Image (cartoon, rainbow, N blue to C red):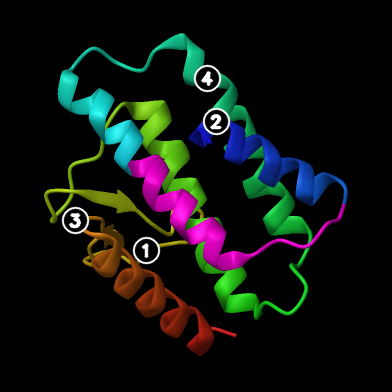
Amino acid sequence: MTNEKKWEQLWDAFRYEEAVDIDDLKHLIFDTYDYLEYFIQEGKGFPLYILPMYKNIVQTRTALDLTPVENVPAPVSAAATDFLEGLCYIYEHGSYSGYYKRSIPLGLTRHTPAGYAEPEANMETYDTFLSSFEDLVAYLSTQE
């Protein structure tokens, strides 16, 4: 199944208040980043046929922010929202160049104090992505 179809199904799950598997969402975030990275490396921009996927990512991000996922702690849900915002940033700006070669910006809707680096996630491998995700969850847990 394509990433586009997976995002459409995920948005439908939120819309119809069906169960959402947060681990599937994590995989989809990483797979989508890889997919977008392919177009960035080609240097040709994003083709129009993947724009509906952007719409579904934005709608999923909004739904995740407004509707808590059953049996998912708030920091995990907030971390997923941050990663979705990062994907939207990549879509809107065409790329992101942070400290890591392959990275995604985080905390775009949170204030970063002056003198601190913008938070980002290492997207080199799925394991580094999971580590960044868990680090963000731990940070957000202390902010409650």
Circle 4: residue type: Leu
CB under 8 Å between callouts 2 and 3?
no
- Compare marks 3 and 1 and give the one earlier in the sequence: 1
CB under 8 Å between callouts 3 and 1?
no
Q: Which residue is located at x 51 percent, y 54 percent?
A: 109
Boundaries of the magenta span: 17-33
Per the image, the residue denoted by label 2 is 4
In this view of the protein, which residue sits in the foreground, 114 or 89? 89
Does the magenta portion include 66?
Answer: no
Q: CA distance from mark 1 to mark 2?
A: 32 Å
Mark 4 lies on a secondary structure that is helix
The answer to whether 67 appears left or right of 36 in the picture is right
Q: Is residue 64 above or below residue 138?
A: above
In this view of the protein, which residue sits in the foreground, 6 or 80? 6
Circle 2: residue type: Glu
Per the image, the residue denoted by label 4 is 51
Circle 3: residue type: Glu
Between label 3 and label 1, give the one nearer the viewer: 3
Q: CA distance from mark 4 to mark 1?
A: 30 Å
